[in-house]
């Protein structure tokens, strides 16, 4: 609860409400199940006890009726002092003997009430005739009483069984069942509260991290959520999302900083030349022509730089939908465009399966940058620029290579040519912004591949990229 204690009261109330809802729901389900099981169990037990007691009483009465029908018996035969007749006096059973006129000859313990019906039975002529009374109050107890005639007007025997102690036992069982049910519900509520805290603790951390990001706009916050359940997966996904957002923000910041740095040089030169325009009438004709030519060249370089910056930014968040493309066909289109622009011979060779899933506009932009780069650095060359597209027989990566016979790239520059705005020392006098190859790298990475550059045997460069195969 240390982290929870630092949360605002309103948010803490919402989180506690989730925990309370979980705990109450858990306790409610447990209470419903416990109540159902408890009621059914109690009813079943009570019914079994009552049926068992009634069966015992009915058995005693039937034995008595059978005995008086079989033997000619008198009230003296059932006297409590008469040996051999204790069988009709089982536990919690009371026996009372009536004379011919319904008088009590041998009272029970406790004594049983005698009513008109009992006297009629005592004077009855037929042995085994019976009258039964239910829920008879005797003192503070409740009895069930059966009066059985001895026949011939000789009297009757009253047999009674106490049922109040059974009901007392069942009431005690009911109270214990209710107490047990209450204990189970309380235990379920406490367990539900503990379980809710355990589950929501990670959600509290995740919520706190999300709100910290929204409040501070800092994306580098670590999300310490563990586990392999849905909450753990959510935490890891949120952490990866923050990491990617932070990386995207860093890329944008670096792009803006690099772009600002690179834009200063042409803008400074452009401002200087514009200031000279105020004195253009004082300049010699040759200087005027050079000034106008410089302005045009600087404007073109600035336009190219802005266009490449836009291309680079678009490559980071390209919304072009991926589709099945053939890199050999894209290479042919790029080669045709390069022939018209540069007048150079461009040869395309393809082998294997050159199809892949990708964004055709981005791939064409990357290929165009490589071919234009080869033509720019081999301006006076006569050997053709070669484009090789090779794939595997089945699904796999596709490799694109641009081969030229230019001056090549120094070993120290090979590892940095794909960095933004990086230009080798021998290339700084040539037009360009240093963004073309970084766009190639962004396109390759966006397609699950990587760029590469190596020195070509015999002079020149092999430069290209790979993309993931489909």
Image (cartoon, helix red, strand yellow):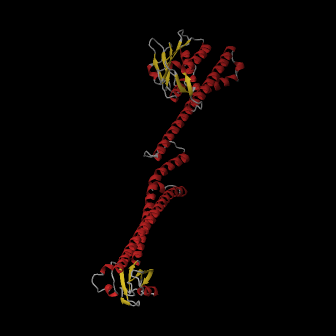
380 w.r.t. 166: above or below: above
In the image, farthest residue toward the right:
281
Residue nearer the viewer, 346 or 437: 346
Q: Is residue 354 left or right of residue 155?
A: right
Residue 461 point in image, percent of width and height: 48, 16
Above or below — where is 344 with respect to 126?
above
Number of numbered tags placed on the structure image = 0
- Whole-percent x, y for residue 447 in the image: 52, 28
Front one among 265 and 121: 121
Image spot of residue 247 (x, y percent): 51, 36
Q: Quadrant of the N terminus?
A: bottom left
Is any atom of residue 433 visible in this view? no
**Residue 329: x, y in percent?**
57, 19
At a point 42% along the width and 75% down the height, the residue shown is 167
The part of the image, by quadrant, that contains residue 328 is top right
Residue 306, by quadrant, is: top right
Name, please, the residue furthest toward the left: 83
Quadrant of the image occupied by residue 277: top right
Q: Nearer the viewer, residue 6 or 446?
A: 446
The correct choice, above or below, for 213 with respect to 324 in the image is below
């Amino acid at each position: 609860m240390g982290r929870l204690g630092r949360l605002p009261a309103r948010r803490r109330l919402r989180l506690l409400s989730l925990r309370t809802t979980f705990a109450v729901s858990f306790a409610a389900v447990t209470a419903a199940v416990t109540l159902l099981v408890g009621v059914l169990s109690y009813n079943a037990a009570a019914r079994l006890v009552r049926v068992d007691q009634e069966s015992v009483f009915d058995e005693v009465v039937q034995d008595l009726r059978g005995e008086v029908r079989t033997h000619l018996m008198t009230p003296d035969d059932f006297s409590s002092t008469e040996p051999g007749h204790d069988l009709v006096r089982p536990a919690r059973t009371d026996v009372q003997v009536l004379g011919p006129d319904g008088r009590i000859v041998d009272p029970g313990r406790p004594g049983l009430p005698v009513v008109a019906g009992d006297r009629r039975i005592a004077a009855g002529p037929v042995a085994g005739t019976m009258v039964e009374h239910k829920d008879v109050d005797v003192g503070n107890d409740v009895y069930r009483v059966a009066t059985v005639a001895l026949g011939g007007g000789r009297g009757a025997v009253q047999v009674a069984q106490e049922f109040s102690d059974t009901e007392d036992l069942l009431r005690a069982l009911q109270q214990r069942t209710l107490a047990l049910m209450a204990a189970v519900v309380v235990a379920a509520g406490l367990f539900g509260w503990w379980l809710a805290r355990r589950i929501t603790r990670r959600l509290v951390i995740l919520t706190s991290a999300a709100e910290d990001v929204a409040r501070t706009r800092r994306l580098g916050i670590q999300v310490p959520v563990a586990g392999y359940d849905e909450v753990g997966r959510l935490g890891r996904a949120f952490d990866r999302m923050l990491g990617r957002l932070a990386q995207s923000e860093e890329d944008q910041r670096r792009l803006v900083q690099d772009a600002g740095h690179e834009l200063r040089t042409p803008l400074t030169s452009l401002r200087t030349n514009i200031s000279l325009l105020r004195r253009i009438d004082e300049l010699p004709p040759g200087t005027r022509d050079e000034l106008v030519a410089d302005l045009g060249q600087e404007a073109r370089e600035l336009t190219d730089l802005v266009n490449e910056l836009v291309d680079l930014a678009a490559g980071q968040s390209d919304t072009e939908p991926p589709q099945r493309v053939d890199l050999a066909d894209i290479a042919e289109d790029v080669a045709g465009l390069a022939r018209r622009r540069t007048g150079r011979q461009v040869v395309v060779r393809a082998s294997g399966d050159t199809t892949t899933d990708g964004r055709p506009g981005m791939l064409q932009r990357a290929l165009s940058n490589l071919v234009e780069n080869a033509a720019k650095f081999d301006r006076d060359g006569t050997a053709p620029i070669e484009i090789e597209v090779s794939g595997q027989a089945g699904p796999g990566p596709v490799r694109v290579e641009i081969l030229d016979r230019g001056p090549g790239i120094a070993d120290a520059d090979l590892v940095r040519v794909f960095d933004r705005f990086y230009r080798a020392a021998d290339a700084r006098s040539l037009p360009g912004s240093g963004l073309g190859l970084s766009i190639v790298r962004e396109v390759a990475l966006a397609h699950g591949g990587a760029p590469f550059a190596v020195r070509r045997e015999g002079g020149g460069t092999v430069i290209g990229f790979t993309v993931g195969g489909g």
